[in-house]
Amino acid sequence: MIDILRFVHDYVPGNSEESAESKPVKVLSGGDYLTFERHKEAQSAMQDARTPSSSLEGLFPKIEDFHAQMEWMQVHV
């Protein structure tokens, strides 16, 4: 998961591996609940990295469980 997030983080605006002062722009990274949990664990594992970009701070995980939400709405309507 860390390798995947590093690959995706290359496309985050403000990504700079050299500068410890530059902060990347926060970008939503969506997925199902399992992907969300793995993303949080990968960021937790990288929290002691040298720069904000190395610690993957530009990616903000978000649960996108659209189908379950739509089924929930159909049941309660």
Image: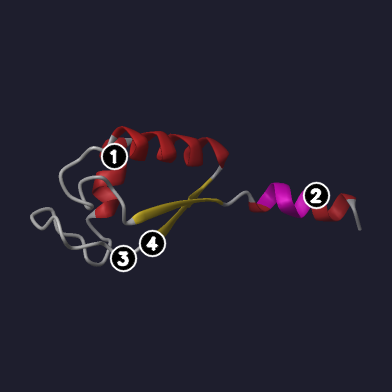
Q: Which residue is mark 2?
A: 72
- Count of numbered badges drawn on the protein: 4
Q: Which residue is mark 1?
A: 47
Q: Quadrant of residue 50?
A: top left
Disc 1 is placed on an element classified as loop
Kindly identify the residue that appears in the image at 17 percent across and 49 percent down.
Answer: 51
Distance in Å between CA atoms under marks 3 and 1: 17 Å
Q: Quadrant of residue 28?
A: bottom left
In the rendered structure, which amino acid carries the disc numbered 4?
A: Val
Could you classify mark 2 by the number of other residues whose Cα lies within 10 Å: few (under 14), some (14-19), or many (20 or more)? few
Distance in Å between CA atoms under marks 2 and 1: 36 Å
Q: Which residue is mark 3?
A: 25
Q: Which residues are magenta?
A: 67-72
Kindly identify the residue that appears in the image at 31 percent across and 45 percent down.
Answer: 5
C-beta proximity under 8 Å, tags 3 and 4: yes
Disc 3 is placed on an element classified as loop
Q: Nearer the viewer, mark 2 or mark 4?
A: 4
Disc 4 is placed on an element classified as strand
By secondary structure, the bulk of the magenta-drawn segment is best described as helix
Residue 25 versus residue 76: which sits nearer the camera? Answer: 25
Disc 2 is placed on an element classified as helix
Kindly identify the residue that appears in the image at 20 percent across and 46 percent down.
Answer: 54
Q: Which mark is residue 27?
A: 4
Q: Is residue 55 above or below residue 21?
A: above
Distance in Å between CA atoms under marks 2 and 3: 33 Å
Q: Quadrant of residue 42?
A: top left
First along the sequence among labels 2 and 3: 3
In the rendered structure, which amino acid carries the disc numbered 2?
A: Trp
Could you classify mark 1 by the number of other residues whose Cα lies within 10 Å: few (under 14), some (14-19), or many (20 or more)? some
